[in-house]
Image: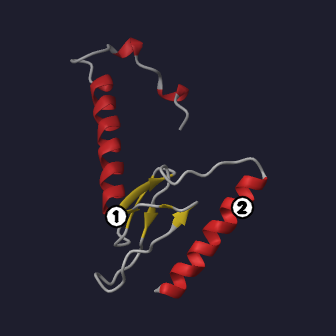
């Protein structure tokens, strides 16, 4: 594990140097590390640092709307997507139901829908 950790630290150091050269900033406080591994308790979490400040290791992180877990399962992401879809579906059901809200004349015609 120390060889992999050393390679990761070298990659982070090169990234920090490149960002410093181009005027960007990387913060250790805003950074997180996820150790992806299916084998539990065999490998220790890596000790990666940015400017001598350790990057905290977390079990779950959200990146570009996708939730990544250290066990390489996507169940939290799928559950979140399902919850968002159910909310949208419930709103549509309320809007379409004429006994709850709008009458048929105020609903959009089927030929004006984008799909």
Other-residue count near label 2 (Cα within 10 Å), few / some / many at <14 / 14–19 / ≥20: some
- Give the quadrant of residue 59: bottom left
> Element at badge 1?
loop
Q: Position of residue 114 (x, y in %)?
A: 55, 33
- Residue 4 circle label: none
Do the numbered discs 1 and 2 sit on residues whose CB atoms are within 8 Å?
no
> Element at badge 2?
helix
- Tell me if residue 86 comes above or below residue 5 in the rendering: above
Q: Position of residue 40 (x, y in %)?
A: 29, 81
Instruction: Tell which residue pokes out farthest to the left in this image.
Output: 99
- Residue 59 circle label: 1
- Tell me if residue 83 comes above or below residue 31 in the rendering: above
Q: CA distance from mark 1 to mark 2?
A: 27 Å
Q: Earlier in the sequence, mark 1 or mark 2?
A: 2
**Residue that carries the numbered disc 2 in the rendered image:** 17
Q: Position of residue 48 (x, y in %)?
A: 50, 69
**Which numbered mark, 1 or 2, is in the foreground of this view?**
2
Of 98 and 65, nearer the camera is 65
- Tell me if residue 2 comes above or below residue 93 in the rendering: below
- Give the quadrant of residue 72: bottom left
Q: Residue at x 54, y 87 (%)?
A: 3
Of 91 and 81, nearer the camera is 81
Left or right: residue 95 versus residue 47 is: left
Report how many numbered discs are placed on residues in the image. 2
Other-residue count near label 1 (Cα within 10 Å), few / some / many at <14 / 14–19 / ≥20: few
Of 85 and 43, nearer the camera is 43
Left or right: residue 11 versus residue 27 is: right
Q: Position of residue 85 (x, y in %)?
A: 35, 43
């Amino acid at each position: 594990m120390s060889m992999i950790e050393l390679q990761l630290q070298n990659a982070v150091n090169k990234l920090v140097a490149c960002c410093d050269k181009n005027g960007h900033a990387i913060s250790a406080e805003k950074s997180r590390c996820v150790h992806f591994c299916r084998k539990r308790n065999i490998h220790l979490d890596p000790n990666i640092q940015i400017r001598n400040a350790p990057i905290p290791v977390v079990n779950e992180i959200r990146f570009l709307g996708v939730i990544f877990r250290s066990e390489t399962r996507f169940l939290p992401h799928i559950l979140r997507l399902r919850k968002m879809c159910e909310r949208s579906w419930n709103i549509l059901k309320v809007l379409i139901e004429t006994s709850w809200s709008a009458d048929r004349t105020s609903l959009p015609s089927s030929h004006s829908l984008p799909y």
